[in-house]
Every structure is written in C-alpha cells, then in structure tokens.
Amino acid sequence: MTVLNDLAERLQIGFSRKIPLFYQSEAAECGLACVGMIAEYWGHKLNLTRLRSEMSVSLNGSTLSDLMTMAKKLDLSGRPLRVEVDDLANVANPCILHWDLNHFVVLVKVSRHYFYIHDPYIGRRRLSRAAFSQHFTGVILELTPIDSMAPMRHDIHQPTLRDVFGRPNGLIGSLAKIVALALVYEICVLGASFLPQVVIDHVVPSQDQSLLSLVIIGFGLLLLIRVGASALRAWTVMAVSASFNLQWRARVFQHMMHLPIPFFEKRNLGDIASRFDSLDVIESAITKQVVEALLDGMLAMGALAMLLGYDPKIAAIALGAMSVYFLLRQGFFARFRELNLEFILSSAKEKTYFLETVRSIQSIRLFGRTDNRAVRWQNLLVDERNADIRQQKLGIMFESMSTLIFGLEGLMIVWVGTAAALTGDLTVGMLIAALSFKDQFSTRVSGFIDTLFQLKMLSLHLERVGDVVLTEREEPEPQRSYVDVAHLSPSIRFEQVSYQYSDHEPRVIDNLSFEIHAGEAVALIGASGCGKTTVIKLMLGMLTPTQGQILIDGTPLSSLNLSEYRQRIGSVMQDDTLLSGSLEENISFFDLQVDAQRVRDVAAMADIRQHIEQLPMGYETLVGELGNTLSGGQKQRVLLARALYRQPDILIFDEATSHLDAQSEQHINTMIRDQAAITRVIVAHRPSTIDSADRVIDIAALNGISAQS
C-alpha cells in the first residue's frame, strides 16, 4: 500500500506547484542543486548544467551565506533560521535544510509521522522523526521571491542520441537488416497459429491423410524458415551490438579525455565509471529493443486484425486489457525511474569507495582501519542491494497486477468465445485459433508497451552520459586562428593575474605580477596554501585566470593552442603517478615510436639509469599505480625522466624532488642546467632546492603588489 500511496501523492491533483528534484553531478554542488530546485518551484525554468557554469562551486562546497548569494542572483530573498524539529511544520516549504553538518537538502513537506525531503545526492526520501533528527542540524534557509522577480528561462537541452553518438555509419542499414529478418521470423510464428484451425476444421472432418501430410510438411518448412531467420537475426544483432558499442564507447571516451581537469576533480571516480555503464543500456535499447518494439507493434496490429475478423467482442476485450495495462505502466513509470537512478547512484558510491580502499590499502593497514573500512563498504553494499531490492519489489507488484489483468482478460475471452462457439458463430478450430491470436496479441502488445517505457527510461541514461558528452572540450576552436607556438621564446609573464575557484570564495591569487625569462631557473616559494600550485596550473593552462593575463613571450596564453603549448612543456606535479606498463613505456609516456636511446639518456639525467639497468628485466620491468618495487625517490626520478623525454623548452616541477637526497638532487640539477636553455619553474620548500634556482619569487609576498623578487 505504501507504493500505491506514493503513486497517489504523485498525481499532483489540485493547483499546488510541484517541487522538482535536481541531482548533483559534482561532489560539492548540493547547495547549488537545492537553490535550483526552489528557484524552479517559484517559477524559474532552470538547467543545472547552465546554473553550474554561471555560479561555479569549488570542492570546498558552499556555506549558508553562499546559498543566499546564489539565491539573490535568482531574485530570491533568503532568511536563515534556527529551528527545532517540532517547529518545521510551521516554516514555509520548500526550504533548505543543513544536513549532517556537511550537506544541504530541500524539505518538501511535513506530515504527522514523516518528513519528505529532496536530497540532491540520493533523491526523494521519506524519513521518520527519529531518523530525521539524526541528520538535521537545526539550521534552515527559507527562500521566497522578491516582488520584482523576473522568471529566468534557461534553454534546456535534453541530451539526444545524436548528441551522445553523433551519426554512426551503417546503423540504419544494420537495423533494417535486423528488422527484415525478425519480420520473417514473426510472420512464421503468426502463421503457425493457423495450424490447429486447419487440422481441426479441415483435416479431421475430411479424414484426408494426404492433406494432413501436406499440412505438416508446409508448417514444417515454415518452422525451418523461422529457425533460420532467428539464427541469422541473433548473429546480426551480436555483430551490430559489438561494433556500435565499440564505436560509441570510443567516441565518449575520446571526448572525456579532452575535458578540462576541473571536470574530474569535482566528480567521484565511481560516478564517472557508472556513466560509461549507461552506454551498454543505450546500445542494447537501440540494437535490440527498438527492433522488438517495431515488430511487437506490427504483429500486435496483425493479431488484433485477426481477432476483429473472428469476433469484435473478443477484440474489444483485448483492447480494454491493453488500455488498463498501459495506464498501469504509466502510473508506475516515475517510481521505476526514481528507483533505477537510486540504484545507479548507490552502485557508483560503492564502486568509488571500493576503488579508494584498494588504492589506499597500505595506509589503511598501517593505521589499523581494515575492519572500519570493511564495515563502511558493507554498509554501502547493503544500500546498493536495498536499492535493487526496492526495484525488484516494485517489479513484483507490477508483474502481479499485469498477470491479474491479462488473466481476467483470458477468462472473459474464453467466456465470450465459447458462447460464440455454442451459438455457431465460431467453429471449434476458429475458437482455438482466436485464443492463439489473443495470446499473440497480449504478449506482443505488453512487450510493445514495456519497450516503449524502457526507451522512455533512456532519458535517465542519456542525461548521465550527456553530463560527459555535453561538457565542452578543452580544445582549439576550429574557426579560430592561433599563434604558432614553435616560434615563441619560453618566457612567462603574469600581469595582474587573479584567480578564485568559485564565485563565492576569496581569491587564491590576487593581482599577481612577475616575469620569468627564457632559460632562467626560478623557484616559487611561500607558505603552504598560498597558491603556488594554483600558479603552476595557471601556467599550464589547466585553469583560466579570473582577471589579468598570462603571456608567453609576450603572447597571451589564451591566444595559443593549449595542446601545442603543452607539447613544449615537461612537468612533474605533486600527484603524478606511474601507469601500468614497463619502465620504458612510462618514461616515454607510451610513445608509439619509442626512442630507446633517448629513454636511456633522460634516465641518466634523472639519475635512475644505473638502478634500472641493474634490474633483472631492465627497462622492461613492469610498474603501475599500485604495485612496483620502486622507492618514493626512484618514482620521482622516473617521473623526472618522463618530463625530460619530450625535450621541453619549459620544465615545471611542483615538489618534484621532495623525496630525493641532496646529492641526487644536485646531480639532476647539474645535468639539466648543462642542456640547452630550458626555462625551469620549481615549487619547493627545501633550502637546497631553492638554492639551485637563479632567482626566487615569493608568491605570498607578491599577492596584491607589484612584482619583486
């Protein structure tokens, strides 16, 4: 009854506005999603992707003050309050609740026993008073429109198949071939329904043995054609599915590889992986379910036509059952979609936690937290299983109702059909054939309706894949002309550069100006958190300045093709890792045409060659993110060799030698200095590293004042 009550509540009978549900895609945008929900409730028509670009949120999340600032931009007035749980029934809904000290949700309504909320991370939730009290911190934010509010209308573009997959070559032809083979198969199935009528009404009364043989041979040939068509169709579906799944996955993966770095920094690993799983659902729908829907629809019409020919009353009963089934499917759809998304999100959380645990197994073991991690993972696994169970329970209830509908339909048709046979309107053979066609119609029409709603469910998966595909790539604009990077000198100048990670946070870099000359070695120093790594990311084009500009040999970085610009840079960042492969592959960064001599030369420059050549497998020694025999200092040397392999004009090191001893660091600095003029930018804290530079720039001291060094 709970499910039926939830369905009844969803009918929205009356004139009350519906509170939408926005799901967050980024790890820390729950506050933005909550503001978006309430803004749409008050008349705006918003798209969270567009809202995200206009009101960016960093990984640090949002405060209540930030939410009020966001709301003000949407012509909403905010009023923060501290209330007790018992007083929530008296506040204006919807409102935003502070949740678990690190999250925001929207309170939809309060009933006698339950609190209904929209959680942008989980979805719709109904909590008892006890459960609600465990999460609610006592702080709420009421948002109401100001008198002069002008409804905002975003151009809401729902992802389409063309957005996700483009124009796949040969898809229409392949689907046409599958449809043709399936049609032959289904015609044979439909034709087989006439066998009982022919035998009962013609062969048995005539007692003609030769006619019986002819009928059996004819229907036997029909069987052979059906088997052949079925096998060919299955083979074709297998080939088409494999081919297009490969094409589509490759296309989405290639697009993802060109997305801006902040896209990955703000999302969970498991969530990104789960979006790729949606591709399998979409591919299956296109190559199988679309064909099945077409066939089921055509054959249902054919079976209905035959029923009309036998007895219109039987056809009317079948149509009535179909209508009830369709309405039932429509009534359950929203809940099915909600539970499906809940399962996907639960699965993504479990996958993220699992991958994090495997990656951090050493720290977990050393701190004795294995049991704790195991329990928390099991809780996430239970949440995932419970989400799946909720889907299955709803499915069982729906199947029971549909079985009842078609069972009653069958009884009524037997009643009406038998009555017609008793009055002589139908022969016994016609009655049996009509019952066979009724079964065909019921099966086909229910399959057709099921497939329609499964295709409708694709919007959920398209939205998830669309979050990847519709995000703009970090690549040159085709129609724009860029300055040729090859002729630029490797000098770098910051001119009054400012940067903030979101509109609601203070600037990390404020009015920063300095210059690094070509061939110069410069150390960037300053207290931890002063913005040194942010400066490096700005140099690399990973971040775009909020104000000011970065010049390379006097040319704005924004005028350069970033891909070509980075080809001239070798970098070692704090969180760089080795990838699964050999040492040679890692040093060359999996170059398709490896220069073996250059690999050895840069290994010598990074003071790692001797160690590698002493290994049993030498440069073919396998390493990876999790398993290898290299020490921290040796890993850094391999990463340094990787940066040097591409023969860069600019070297950027962010704590790249922090694990090296002073002698090794001095050797590497000497080897690099002896090369052709390379501009070096070094972020460091160790005095020996700082002393190796020609010049020192104190980032903390330069923030907000003119360049000095």
Image (spheres, helix red, strand yellow):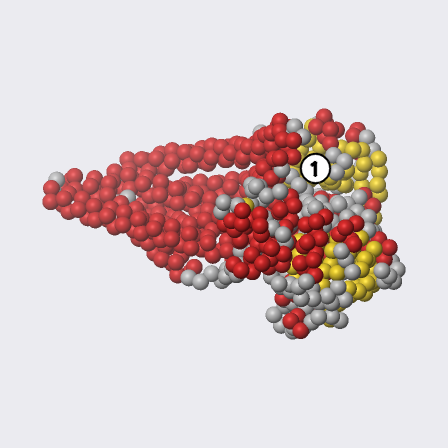
In-front residue for pair 61/452: 61
Seen from this angle, which residue lies furthest right?
705
In-front residue for pair 17/142: 142
* Residue 402 shows in the view: yes
In-front residue for pair 463/622: 622
Q: Quadrant of the N terminus?
A: top right
Location of residue 549 by image quarter: bottom right
* Residue at image coords 15%, 40%: 205
| Residue hosting label 1 | 117
418 displayed left or right of 147:
left
Query: What is the x, y in percent for residue 374?
Result: 60, 29
Q: Amino acid at mark 1?
A: Ile
* Residue 39 shows in the view: no
Query: What is the x, y in percent for residue 189?
Result: 30, 46
Location of residue 256 by image quarter: bottom right
Crowd tier of the residue under label 1, counting other residues whose Cα lies within 10 Å: few below 14, some 14–19, many 20 or above: many
Query: What is the x, y in percent for residue 709?
Result: 85, 60
